[in-house]
Amino acid sequence: MSDTDQGVLAKILFLDDSPLLRTAISQSLELEGFEVLCASQIEEAEVILKEHQFDVMIVDCNLGTENGLELIVDWRQKETANSELNPAFIIAIGGSYNKEEAYQAGASSWLDKPFTPDELEALIRENLQ
C-alpha cells in the first residue's frame, strides 16, 4: 500500500473535469475511510503524482480538450522505469466507446458513466483485496 495514514483504507487520486462529480465521489469515498485527492486536468494530476503515491487512480477518459488515457499511458511507463513506485490500480471511467482504448493504455478496470458511488466503491474494494 502507498504512504497512507493509519486507518485509511487506501489513497486514491480522482481525475475528472466535473466539479460536481469530484465533490460527490470524494465525499462518498472519504466517508467510507478512503483518502481522496482530486484533480480536474492532467497537468494538475501530474503535480499531485510527483508528491504522493496512490493505491488507486480513477481517471476520466474524456476531460474536455484532454484525454485521460494520456495520463494512464504516462503513469504505466513511469512504473516500469522506476521500481520504487507502487503499481497503482487504475480505474478508467467514461463512455463505453473508450473501454478498449483504456485497457490498451494500461487501465486495470473500467466503469461506464454514469455510475453510482456504491458501484465505484465496490470495484475499489474488490481490487484492493
Image (cartoon, rainbow, N blue to C red):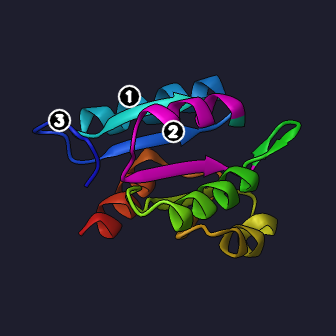
Residue 46 quadrant: top right
Q: Is residue 66 left or right of residue 60?
A: right
Q: Which residue is mark 3?
A: 5
Q: Amino acid at mark 1?
A: Gln
Residue 41 visible, this angle? no
Q: Residues within 10 Å of mark 1 (few under 14, many from 20)?
A: some
**8 within the magenta span:** no
- Give the foreground label among 1 and 2: 2
Q: Earlier in the sequence, mark 1 or mark 3?
A: 3
In the image, which residues are magenta?
43-61
Task: Check the image and report above or below for 57 versus 99.
Answer: above
Residue 128 visible, this angle? yes
Residue 22 quadrant: top right
Q: Earlier in the sequence, mark 1 or mark 2?
A: 1
- CA–CA distance between discs 1 and 3? 18 Å
Image x and y of residue 86, in percent? 37, 58
Please identify the quadrant where the N terminus is shown.
bottom left
Q: Which residue is mark 1?
A: 27
Image x and y of residue 28, in percent? 36, 35
Please identify the quadrant where the C terminus is shown.
bottom left
Q: Amino acid at mark 3?
A: Asp
- CA–CA distance between discs 1 and 2? 20 Å
